[in-house]
Image (cartoon, helix red, strand yellow):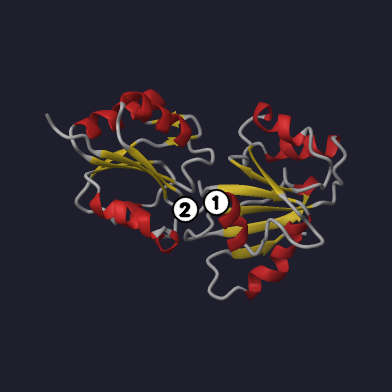
Amino acid sequence: MTAPGLVSLVGAGPGDPELLTRRALDRLGRADLILNDALVPDELVALAPQARRFYVGKRAGRHSIDQDGIHRLMIRAARRGDRVVRLKCGDPFVFGRGGEEALALQAAGVPFEIVPGVTSAIAGPALAGIPVTHRGLASGFVVVSGHAESAYAPILGSLAPAAATVVVLMGLTTRGALAGFLIARGWDAATPAAVVLGASHDGAATWTGRLDGLAAAALPPGELPGLLVIGAVAGLATTLAPALAATPVAAVAVP
């Protein structure tokens, strides 16, 4: 009987290979099979040249395979003795369904491990010159999914206006509705806001403005991944981003 392999649920960070953890790099180097998400750059997958690659990405409703199918692929390969890397953008446990996959592997009796990654919820703002906490401006932050009001309303609806920095993942297309939701609950329309696009990727850019300007924010064309930052700290981008040494993010301030 073939000894079971190992499934590594690996966080790829925001995309720059230099922001991978040493453990993530090691697991890529040892992998027999890579199951990668849509936002994982080819440069990261290329770090495992000997591995077979299976794309399992999901973008804006376009799914290459459903979640149960991903579970079956991981389990089947591990039972063959393969070393499997399930490669996810950011951190596998931050809106990455890593918990679901870990539970499926545990139920199947398949050995697995978690390799944390640098979540884009913190790395994206940082690369744009936005600290998610800052003395005198924000003592905490919340991270929500912006794909639908049902996802963010329970948290943002209970948050006092300006009580924390709000970081929104998967919220580019709903940014106008989300801004309206916050303003209707007492947030000042002039609250600083930012859209960070493609942090650590080529073509990265940042829009900065006011909360009530999010809906009309002029963003560059394409499908760069992006996130929203809402709160006083977003205003620091115009000061800090130009001073960053060799920053990959081009700050584009919009009045």
Classify 138 as above or below 83: below
The residue type indicated by label 1 comes to Ser
Q: CA distance from mark 1 to mark 2?
A: 7 Å
Residue highlighted by disc 1: 120
Q: Is residue 74 shown left or right of residue 213?
A: left
Q: Earlier in the sequence, mark 1 or mark 2?
A: 2
Near-viewer residue (49 or 143): 143
Residue 88: which quarter of the image?
Answer: top left
Residue 255: which quarter of the image?
Answer: bottom right
The residue type indicated by label 2 comes to Gly
Mark 1 Cα shell of 10 Å, populated few (<14), some (14-19), many (≥20): many
Q: Is residue 38 visible?
A: yes
Classify 39 as above or below 47: above
Q: Is residue 54 shown left or right of residue 18?
A: left
Near-viewer residue (184 or 116): 116
Checking the image for residue 128, the label placed there is: none
Residue highlighted by disc 2: 13
Q: Is residue 44 shown left or right of residue 94?
A: left
- Kindly indicate whether the residue at mark 2 contacts the one at mark 1 (C-beta within 8 angstroms): yes
Near-viewer residue (150 or 250): 150
Q: Position of residue 24 (x, y in %)?
A: 36, 53
Classify 175 as above or below 18: above
Q: Position of residue 10 (x, y in %)?
A: 39, 46
For image coordinates 41% across by 58% down, the residue present is 21
Q: Position of residue 86 (x, y in %)?
A: 35, 41
